[in-house]
Image: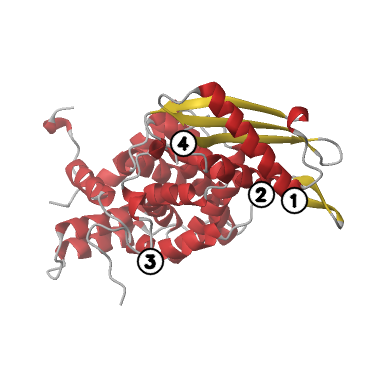
Amino acid sequence: MSDRDRAGGEDALDLAAAALRAHTEDGWVLARPGLLERVRRAFRPSAPVLGTHELGDFRVAADVVVDGLRTAVDALPDAAADRISCSTGGDDRLESVLVEVAVAFGTPLPALAGRVRRVVVARLRELLGEAAPAEEAVQVDVHVGDVVRTLREVR
Amino acid sequence: MRTTPPGAAPDGAHPDERTDERTDEVLARRAALGDRDAFGVLVDRHGPALYRYAVRLLDERGQADDCLQDALLAAWRGLPSFRGDASVRTWLFTIVRHEVHARSRRRAGPGGAAPVDAEEVLERIRDVRQDPERTSVQAALREALDLALRLLPPRQRSAWLLREVEELSYEEIAQVLGTTSTAVRGLLERARTTLAATLEDWR
């Protein structure tokens, strides 16, 4: 469209759109801390997972289990959790865990997979007690979800 | 006394939040695993645009805070089931639009929203333009645009904001509005015509 074809007001409209695009609302600046705090305290409903300790059975939210596994994997110096999914059976017993990790370039993958599996099983034991499945009974597949130069790009 | 070093993010935000190089998709996957810091980065990255969008769809600025809060909580809770069929940004705008729509429907009641008086809007735009006290042309233009936007039906207004201000593609806008790219093209055409005509006297 040439300048001559432009209807009256279109130049002003373009300028106004650009002005709005560059503008951050005062309301956002004021609301942001409260919104972030509210989200940080928010509960995320999720399916129950069976745990057992000396006093008997209990249930823990799958979201808590996933969060616990994420922090365990992230504690490794050369891996970061990318995806984690859990499957439970009819009595809420944990049956399988799938962990995908991102690794730093050059990391020997078979050794890393073994270490990821060990920290996952150990954390499951902490979280679920005797209801945690044994290592050989649990399907813990470690996939390389994303190979990155540095873990800084993931964590 | 607490001081904020130059370049630090304000209001207690993590200093890396403005320079975080992780993609939205990586942050979303991390947030789905319970990483609240990753979600905080997403909020800081897209929050200003989501707020800008919500404010202009709701008309009442006081409602934008509650709307954003509900939308962000819905996003946090929905992240574990987010599969990446749309971009994270498009998905967030879609959630905000649903929240806005629900609030607008509740507020309007069974009779629908009250009509906007076009003459009154034009009069107010003339006042903004001629105000000798105005200190910034940019601010005056924004104010005039906000008034003009009130003349648009919700879907036209939404499409125009997403395209011209937030720079989403036609396809992305269609996802947010739950329609087709062809329908978006029509909405934008009508919105532009109305807005340009409303701002015609602005020189």
Callout 2, which amino acid? Val
Q: CA distance from mark 2 to mark 4?
A: 20 Å
**Mark 3 belongs to chain:** A
| Closer mark to the observer between disc 2 and disc 3 | 2
Disc 2 marks which residue?
A64
| Closer mark to the observer between disc 4 and disc 1 | 1
Callout 1, which amino acid? Val
| Closer mark to the observer between disc 4 and disc 3 | 4
Q: Do the residues at pointers 1 and 3 share their chain?
A: yes
Q: CA distance from mark 4 to mark 3?
A: 28 Å
Callout 4 secondary element: helix
Disc 3 marks which residue?
A30
Residue neighbourhood size for the residue with mark 2, other residues' Cα within 10 Å, grouped as few (<14), some (14–19), many (≥20): some
Disc 1 marks which residue?
A60
Residue B109, above or below B85: below
Callout 2 secondary element: helix
